[in-house]
Image (cartoon, grey):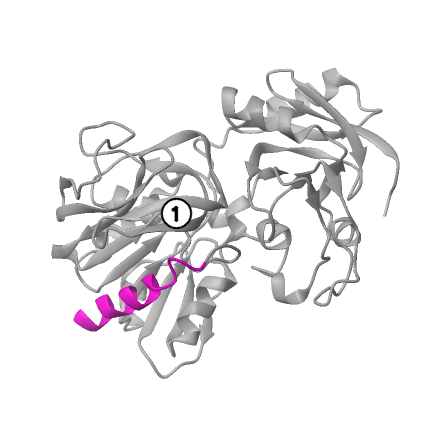
Amino acid sequence: MTENSPGYILLEDGSRFDGTLCGATEGGVGEVVFNTSMTGYQEAVTDPSYAGQIITFTYTMIGNYGVSAGAMESDRPHARGVIMRDARNNSDAASAEGGWLDWLEANGVWAITGVNTRALVRHIRDQGAMRGGIFPAGVPVDEAKARIEAEPSMVGSDFASKVSPEQPVEHDGNGPHVVALDTGIKASIVNQFLERGCRVTLLPCLTGADEVMARQPDLVFLANGPGDPAAVSAVTDTVRALIGKKPMVGICLGHQLLSRAVGLETFKLPFGHRGSNHPVKDLETGVIEITSQNHGFAVVGPDGAGTIEKDEPVRWQTDHGEAVLSHINLYDRTVEGLRLPEAKAMTVQHHPEAGPGPRDARHLFDRFLDLAKEG
């Protein structure tokens, strides 16, 4: 692990934050975002939804309980870099199999510590998530700025097809057959289906509708994933062709893709929802659940606005029947979930698998499978 090597963060608007490099030290660029979770740093970095991004952790101390194989959400890190106030390399926790900083360096993840993350996060909240980079102190600012400007905007970027598997992946089970278009599915999601006895098939996200149907699914699942939902129109076309043929469920990016497939629009949030403390109201039960979230885009409301003012199951008329608001985000009043009764479909924007995070919404996997039984 490289120690005491000075570095800095530069944002595309010219803002600079200094610190000490502590992972892979060559540095690089991406969209700088923030995550408010107090734990789950390894799960975040290995979540494919963070492809193309640099994570700023708002919690002060990161790395205090080490890393382990059981905390992997995929086969490798997908976040390009991490920004921390106080990074630790501890490996003496009961579950630890290695140190966090050693792991970051070994996996080529750029990292910087000693940063005033409070000031950085406040800046992102005020100005919005933006491109930026982590650089060694010896890199001239003009060079860093040019590298940032050469990085494509997250708007219009297709990262989902880059993290999707090249070949189908099969998981055996005796229960309902869940066939997923894998745009970056987390291991925790797969595990929730497997714990319920499901057989799970993960298909490359550009798989066509005919091949999906040839797998004889009981439930078509649309996974989480990175990037702009508007940039993966081929997947949206496949989803549109599948609507109504089999029960369908979408989580996170899958929620956005299904929404777009029925004629709704999506938009980029100023700084997104990333963390494990987001309150969501289930409008069908009236229960407020604390949820895990990781997304930068949201679905436009029925009147064309980005937010919905009332805690009521408002309705859209779509190309595939009526859509009913089922969940709402209580932080900023954005759409958190839909039901499409005529299409036997439902979506949620948050992550009910809670990997990591609170388990309030895990019961939704039972609701997903109840929908499959209706099909």
Q: Residues within 10 Å of mark 1 (few under 14, many from 20)?
A: many
Which amino acid, mark 1? Leu
Q: Residue at x 70, y 67 (%)?
A: 95
Q: Is residue 215 visible?
A: yes
Q: Position of residue 98 (x, y in %)?
A: 77, 61
Q: Position of residue 96 (x, y in %)?
A: 73, 64
Taking depth in this image into account, of 293 and 289 the one nearest to the observer is: 289
Q: Residue at x 11, y 56 (%)?
A: 342
Q: Position of residue 155 (x, y in %)?
A: 44, 30
Q: Is residue 152 left or right of residue 60?
A: left
- Per the image, the residue denoted by label 1 is 253
Q: Residue at x 77, y 33 (%)?
A: 114
Secondary-structure class at tag 1? helix
Magenta span: helix, strand or loop, mainly?
helix
Q: Is residue 321 left or right of residue 164?
A: left
* Above or below, comparing residue 125 to residue 251 in the picture: above
Q: Is residue 375 visible?
A: no
* Above or below, comparing residue 90 to residue 131 in the picture: below
Taking depth in this image into account, of 190 and 210 the one nearest to the observer is: 190
Q: Residue at x 29, y 52 (%)?
A: 287
- Please tell me whether residue 112 belongs to the stretch shown in magenta: no
Residue numbers of the magenta segment = 359-374
Q: Position of residue 231 (x, y in %)?
A: 40, 38
| Quadrant where the C terminus is found in the figure | bottom left
Tell me which corner region of the image, top left, top right, bottom left or bottom right, holds residue 94: bottom right
